[in-house]
Image (spheres, grey):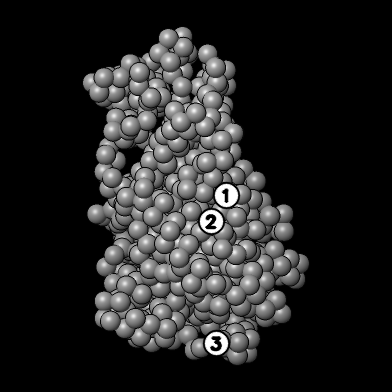
């Protein structure tokens, strides 16, 4: 009897396919279904070739098979517009939803900061914030767990090729959601987020700068240690997460400069912003599976 | 060049682009003083915000002396004829800022993106147009791509609802022939109802010459800055430009002596440093680097002992775009490590 939880991926685009490739290596999650809406789509054809069952009629095509195939977790890589419906239908069948869209119906999840809490509560819907949030909030939290942070600000620079039309049409959603999570998860009293799109060729690696203003004189040794520890935590699921420079201390300002290199599964290595989303989403599901296998949490009964 | 009888709308940048040169620390009194002087001189449009636009207040770009709300609320009620514009960079500011600016009486919103990323501006341009504002699409760092690419991106902004498109020489890198080619193509291919604008920087001393080339090629709006107060070696100095326009018989509606006096009596005395073409500002123009990087690079030089010129040239080589100010300290740290300085 496998300890692995069986999973469905909704949205066979770049994110969904990358997630599938990572999942095939997982000790805890077994991909079974790929859900799309266009039978002719490359993504669905690819998923079929990779041995997945496919739905070409959206989540409705998956629903009748959820219990028979024992689907326990689903990853939504579609859009904020359809996520709520997808989540409602699958939650009703006891499927835990990992939301990679900006819908944010459920609480924000940044694995090294608050995943354990969500797993303990068996949250049925967790939201993975944004790519910029996954790359930067661990650093804000690394400072705020040492001493209070009055203001946290993150600057995410991503290559033009790595951001799709959805993000572009609603870039305000990125800045608002990320700023909110810098506060709620990062622990800053006030948060701000900035995103810069750079079209250079060859494409640049995702870069992130994190600035924190501490309320009192920063404890340099403790913050430096905390940041290095946190980098190691993130590297467990994103090996290419790298501290390039810093922390730099300037009065009450603490600054770190990060680079995020992806694993290069389906997405190119420079798209660390997308890789950190899929890796964090998978890491989240894996912890639920581990805790369930160890009897720490109980999944919804069937 | 014969421009006789042409009309041009001048747009002053001293209270927005000039914020870069003042590290965003212009006082409310200084702003009102300069804006009222410009209004009296007949300047039709005056831009007021943080140097990086609405919502630019940040550790990354600098906290300003006052909020955008405070600046706009102080200046707008004092204007007799001039209209006030605000800049907005999607990714930094949001439609919430845009609505705030509209509520405070801003007439013109300028939505700025890097010259290849116009599609991040759809929601902001759409909202401004829907609110019936004078809506401008502002394509920055326009020297980095071909005229055809600028046109493609301009058409996107036009399709979202912009009634004016700017070709923006953020690095002060362009020479007049390039301005002619890019503005000319926009003028011939965009709708006749869409205005064309040019925003220059003086980093190669080309502010005036490029602006004239832009008018000749069909631009109806020209940005500049009284006393040149702006990022890098400043913007096209407007008092100089007004004198040149007057000699060439171009109508701007701005009174020459009045704007000369605003420059000399109100702007120059409050400058932190002379706005001139020093070697670092020249490097911006030569290497094609975003003008507001200037003071950041100078500070990095002072802190880490790496020449600002070397930092700027490397940033140009890497294809850095507007808003990437954080890369300056990052790069200086990396270069200082390589040299064994830290």
Of labels 3 and 2, the one closer to you:
2
Task: Have a look at marks 1 and 3 and say if they share a chain.
Answer: no
The chain under label 3 reads B
Q: How crowded is mark 2: few (under 14 residues within 10 Å), some or many (20 or more)?
A: many
Left or right side of A51 for B211: right
Q: Check if mark 1's residue and mark 2's residue have beta carbons within 8 Å.
A: yes
Provide the residue designation for mark 1. Answer: A185
Res. B76 image quadrant: bottom right
Of labels 1 and 3, the one closer to you:
1
Separation of residues labelled 1 and 3 (CA atoms): 40 Å
Separation of residues labelled 1 and 2 (CA atoms): 7 Å
Report if residue B98 is visible in the image.
no
Res. A216 image quadrant: bottom right
Whether B161 is drawn above or below A26: the answer is below
Residue at figure coordinates x 60%, y 75% from the top left: A217
State which tag comes first along the sequence, 1 or 2. Answer: 2
Whether B213 is drawn above or below A43: the answer is below
Res. B97 image quadrant: bottom right
The chain under label 2 reads A
Q: Check if mark 1's residue and mark 3's residue have beta carbons within 8 Å.
A: no
The residue closer to the viewer here, B174 or B141, is B141
Left or right side of A116 for B79: right
Name the spot of residue A31 as percent of width and height, x first.
35, 24
Provide the residue designation for mark 2. Answer: A141
Residue at figure coordinates x 45%, y 62% from the top left: A227
Name the spot of residue A106 as percent of width and height, x first.
59, 34
Residue at figure coordinates x 41%, y 51% from the top left: A233
Provide the residue designation for mark 3. Answer: B272
């Amino acid at each position: 009897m496998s300890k692995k939880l069986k999973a469905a991926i909704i949205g066979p685009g770049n994110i969904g396919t990358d997630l599938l490739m990572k999942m095939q290596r997982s000790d805890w999650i077994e991909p079974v279904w790929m859900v799309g809406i266009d039978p002719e789509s490359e993504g669905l054809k690819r998923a079929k070739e990779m041995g997945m069952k496919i739905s070409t009629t959206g989540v409705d095509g998956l629903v009748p098979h959820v219990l028979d195939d024992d689907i326990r977790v689903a990853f939504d890589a579609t859009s904020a517009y359809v996520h709520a419906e997808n989540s409602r239908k699958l939650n009703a069948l006891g499927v835990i939803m990992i939301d990679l869209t900006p819908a944010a119906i459920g609480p924000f999840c940044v694995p090294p900061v608050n995943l354990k809490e969500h797993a303990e509560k068996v949250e049925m819907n967790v939201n993975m914030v944004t790519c910029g949030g996954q790359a930067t909030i661990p650093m804000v939290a690394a400072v705020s767990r040492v001493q209070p942070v009055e203001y946290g600000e993150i600057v995410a620079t991503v290559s033009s090729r790595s951001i799709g039309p959805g993000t572009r049409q609603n870039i305000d959603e990125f800045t608002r959601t990320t700023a909110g999570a810098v506060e709620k998860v990062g622990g800053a009293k006030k948060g701000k987020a900035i995103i810069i799109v750079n079209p250079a060729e060859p494409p640049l690696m995702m870069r992130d700068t994190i600035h924190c203003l501490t309320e009192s004189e920063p404890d340099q040794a403790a913050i430096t240690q905390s940041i290095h520890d946190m980098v190691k935590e993130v590297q467990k699921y994103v090996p290419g997460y790298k501290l390039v420079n810093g922390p730099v201390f300037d009065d009450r300002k603490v600054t770190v400069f990060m680079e995020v290199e992806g694993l290069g599964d389906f997405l190119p290595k420079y798209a660390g912003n997308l890789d950190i989303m899929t890796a964090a989403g998978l890491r989240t599901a894996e912890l639920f599976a581990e805790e369930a296998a160890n009897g720490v949490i109980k999944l919804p009964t069937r | 060049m014969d421009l006789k009888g042409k009309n041009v709308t001048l747009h002053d940048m001293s209270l927005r682009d000039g914020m870069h040169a003042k590290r965003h620390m212009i006082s409310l009194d200084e702003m009102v003083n300069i804006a009222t002087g410009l209004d009296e001189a007949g300047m039709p449009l005056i831009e007021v915000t943080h140097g990086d636009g609405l919502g630019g207040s940040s550790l990354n770009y600098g906290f300003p002396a006052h909020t955008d709300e405070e600046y706009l609320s102080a200046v707008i009620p004092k204007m007799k004829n001039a209209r006030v514009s605000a800049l907005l960079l999607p990714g930094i500011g949001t439609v919430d800022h845009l609505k705030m600016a509209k509520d405070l009486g801003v007439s013109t919103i300028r939505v700025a993106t890097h010259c290849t990323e116009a599609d991040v501006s759809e929601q902001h341009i759409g909202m401004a147009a829907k609110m019936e504002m004078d809506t401008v699409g502002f394509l920055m760092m326009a020297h980095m791509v071909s005229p055809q690419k600028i046109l493609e991106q301009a058409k996107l902004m036009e399709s979202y609802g912009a009634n004016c498109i700017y070709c923006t020489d953020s690095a002060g890198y362009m020479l007049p022939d390039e301005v002619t080619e890019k503005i000319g193509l926009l003028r011939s291919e965009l709708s006749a109802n869409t205005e064309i604008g040019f925003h220059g920087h003086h980093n190669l001393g080309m502010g005036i010459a490029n602006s004239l080339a832009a008018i000749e090629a069909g631009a109806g709006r020209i940005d500049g800055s009284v006393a040149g107060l702006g990022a890098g070696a400043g913007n096209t100095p407007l008092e100089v430009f007004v004198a040149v326009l007057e000699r060439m018989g171009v109508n701007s509606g701005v009174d020459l002596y009045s704007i000369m006096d605003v420059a000399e009596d109100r702007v120059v005395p409050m400058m932190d440093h002379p706005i001139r073409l020093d070697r670092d500002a020249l490097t911006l123009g030569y290497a094609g680097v975003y003008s507001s990087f200037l003071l950041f690079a100078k500070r990095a030089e002072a802190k880490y002992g790496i020449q600002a010129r070397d930092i700027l040239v490397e940033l140009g080589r890497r294809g850095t775009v507007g808003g990437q100010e954080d890369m300056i300290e990052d790069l200086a740290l990396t270069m200082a490590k390589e040299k064994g300085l830290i």
